[in-house]
Amino acid sequence: MDNETRQFVRRLGFPLGFVGFIWVVHIVHAITGLDMTRLGINPRHVEGLPGILTAPLIHGSWEHLFSNSVSFLMLGAVLFWFYPRIALRSILWLYVLSGLGIWIFGQPNSFHIGASGVVYGMVSLVFWSGIFRRNVKSVVLALIVMVVYAGLFEGILPGKEGISWEGHLLGGIAGILLAWYYRKDIEEDEIAPEEEEEEEKRYFLPRDTFEITMAQRRALYEQRLREQQGEL
């Protein structure tokens, strides 16, 4: 395996593995006919707490599964490729925070399933990273995500039956918080917004080339020569 292939697997292995796993779960559900809805998040019920871990793995339909899979792969690729230092940590935190938020604030006596909250969190994370980091790369990625996923903002509004708008909204809020928290975790290809000190700047010629006299230059040469002879 060459370096490029190894790098590709390292950066995209997690998104591909997660999507593959949720497809296996849905195929098992389709074949066996088991009712997995009860594994979702039941807000403010103790028995619904395990759903924080299991709910994102369960989807109500093939359309729901396909939509979340494509978005998770695309956004996962963006995070692991352009923000590798924070990608895995961010996704794991989005997973937990979006689920915990649903359990605390979600509509009672209902079961919330699907990875949509994590997806909304990833969209929010990439967009707000551009706002908080304000370098060229992050701003361009934020604009691309805003254009591609502009239609998702409708999903945070209440009123649509069968859609966990709370999960979408809370996932988005978690993405904002993480973008702010990780704003100073600079990637290797990002330039820190720090002004260079005068003495650290590099010049093609020594800065005093045209400021010292010939006699001074000769004296410096003789001093260096004596130092070299002393070392010998």
Image (cartoon, rainbow, N blue to C red):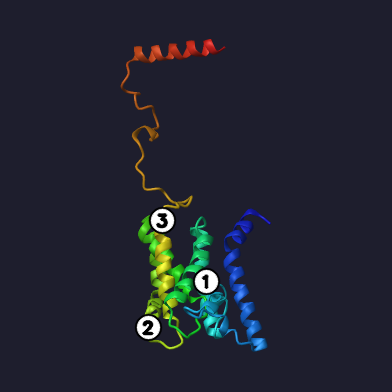
Q: Which image quarter is the C terminus in?
A: top right
Q: Is residue 141 visible?
A: no
2 to 32, vertically: above or below:
above
Q: Nearer the viewer, mark 1 or mark 2?
A: 2
Looking at the image, the residue that sits furthest to the left is 211
Please give the label number shown on residue 183. 3
Q: What residue appears at the point 60 percent right and 57 percent down from the top-left corner?
A: 7
Looking at the rendered structure, the secondary structure element under dot 2 is loop
**Amino acid type, residue under disc 2 in the picture:** Pro
Viewer-closest of 41 and 151: 41
| Disc with the residue nearer the chain's start (3 vs 1) | 1
Between the C-alphas of marks 2 and 3, the distance is: 30 Å
Disc 1: CA contacts within 10 A as few (<14), some (14-19) or many (>=20):
many
32 to 17, vertically: above or below:
below
Q: What residue appears at the point 44 percent right and 12 percent down from the top-left corner?
A: 223
Q: Which image quarter is the N terminus in?
A: bottom right
Q: Quadrant of residue 135?
A: bottom left
Q: Is residue 211 visible?
A: yes
Between the C-alphas of marks 1 and 2, the distance is: 23 Å
| Disc with the residue nearer the chain's start (2 vs 3) | 2
Please give the label number shown on residue 72. 1
| Disc with the residue nearer the chain's start (1 vs 2) | 1
- The residue that disc 2 covers is 158
**Amino acid type, residue under disc 3 in the picture:** Arg
